[in-house]
Amino acid sequence: MIATTIKNGVPLILGDMLISSSQLPAHFLLPTLFDNVIPYLPPSTDYPVDLRQKIYFLAPHVCAAFAGTVAHIKPFLEDVAMYCRYCPDIKGADLQAYVQQYVAATPLGDVVMQILVLDKMEGIPLMHIMKAGHWETGTSPLVGDITAAGSGAVDFIAMAELEANVLHAVEASQLHEQAILANVTLIVRILAQERAVLTTVQRYWGAGFEVAYAEGGDFHKLDDITFIIFQGQIDETGHIETPAPVLILYYKYHGDNLVITALMSPHGAIHVTETHYIFRYIEFYAYPFIVKPIIPMGDDRQPPTDTSFVSTRLAAGYLIGANGGYYIPASLHFEQDMKVEYRHQKSLIITMDKHIMETLIGQVKSEFSHEKKSL
């Protein structure tokens, strides 16, 4: 699945990571679920087999996103990447003519794609957009206008069209920052839902997301960010135990390779001070998922063996079970309110301001009370 959202006039490009095949694997791990997902999937024509990137920078000012059959995408991507390498200052109209010529000679089958070129007119970047394949459209109160293509297009738009329940939103003065934060909120809610129910994977999409955006005349990918999934339960009396972090996903690019350091923490200690909740874990599972591009893009450096990190760029999703379903609010914390400290294979500490948890519990109880009154 690939998508473009436009909020406040700012386009962002999103791509999921799941690759499916008709060959049934014996084992497949998701970053969102530390378990073999194959036994949980119904009989199907396709099954998850790999994680790969679907967004590519063919030049600093050229961004391409693909969905469809990898065997069709790969030769086209190799060809157009080489063309851009030899024409580093290529204009949108020239690239469009080249792509049209390629497609006329070599049909792309089920491939859908979008290529964006930042042309400069008197020093001002202008977006040149070209698309191919079938695209769905929608409008979201959170992320704005949406176009999406590929296996999860309809589901992605349906999830985005739901009213977002944001507990704590980061204030951003720049329009592109507002757009990024809105999309990060959507992503963390999808990841939380994927952990609870495998609907995304059953429909051949999900498993993680890349986000690309334009700034300063070039394209960039959202990097060095952590997604945290908290889990809790509210009973019929309205009592809710303190939701605890059960999954941490730290995204970091090393050259062309994206490394998702996934940490699952089934047991830990909660320490509450006057100002903070502190979650300490000594026993946890850690697994690095390496998400490679479909073809080498020129910087295939190896990720470090030490995956330690400290992160204050956080998106939190909260899985609160109630009445056989889930509430999934979200909160954002960039440089404030929450921090994750991971020492490779030694310790994991999550610190969050007390008001975040108090706001969460208060809102969940309010939602639960409203639901009971409406029955």
Image: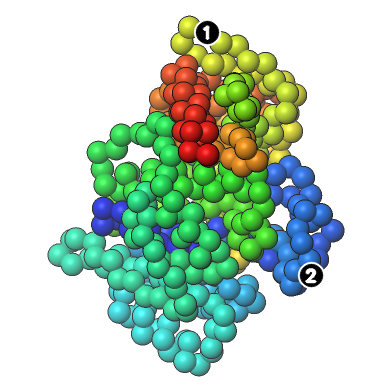
Question: Which amino acid does the dot numbered 1 rest on?
Answer: Thr
Q: Position of residue 26 (x, y in %)?
A: 84, 58
User: Crowding at label 1, few (<14), some or many (≥20) Cα neighbours within 10 Å?
Assistant: few
Check the image and name the residue furthest to the top: 274
Residue 289 visible in image: no
Q: Position of residue 112 (x, y in %)?
A: 50, 75
323 or 113: nearer the viewer: 323
Q: Is residue 188 left or right of residue 308?
A: left
Among numbered discs 1 and 2, the one appearing first in the sequence: 2
Residue 92, quarter of picture: bottom left
> In the rendered image, which residue does mark 2 sit on?
23
Q: Quadrant of the N terminus?
A: bottom right
As drawn, the label of residue 355 is none
Residue 247 visible in image: yes
Does 283 sit above or below residue 149?
above
Does 133 sit above or below residue 308?
below
Q: Is residue 121 left or right of residue 168?
A: left
Q: Position of residue 133 (x, y in %)?
A: 47, 79
Question: Which amino acid does the dot numbered 2 rest on?
Answer: Gln
Q: SS for tag 1?
A: loop
Q: Position of residue 17 (x, y in %)?
A: 59, 58
As drawn, the label of residue 273 is 1
Q: Comparing marks 1 and 2, which lies closer to the viewer?
A: 1
Q: Is residue 178 left or right of residue 364?
A: left
Which residue is painted at 40% across and 25% down in the image? Answer: 336
Does 73 sit above or below residue 184?
below
265 or 101: nearer the viewer: 265
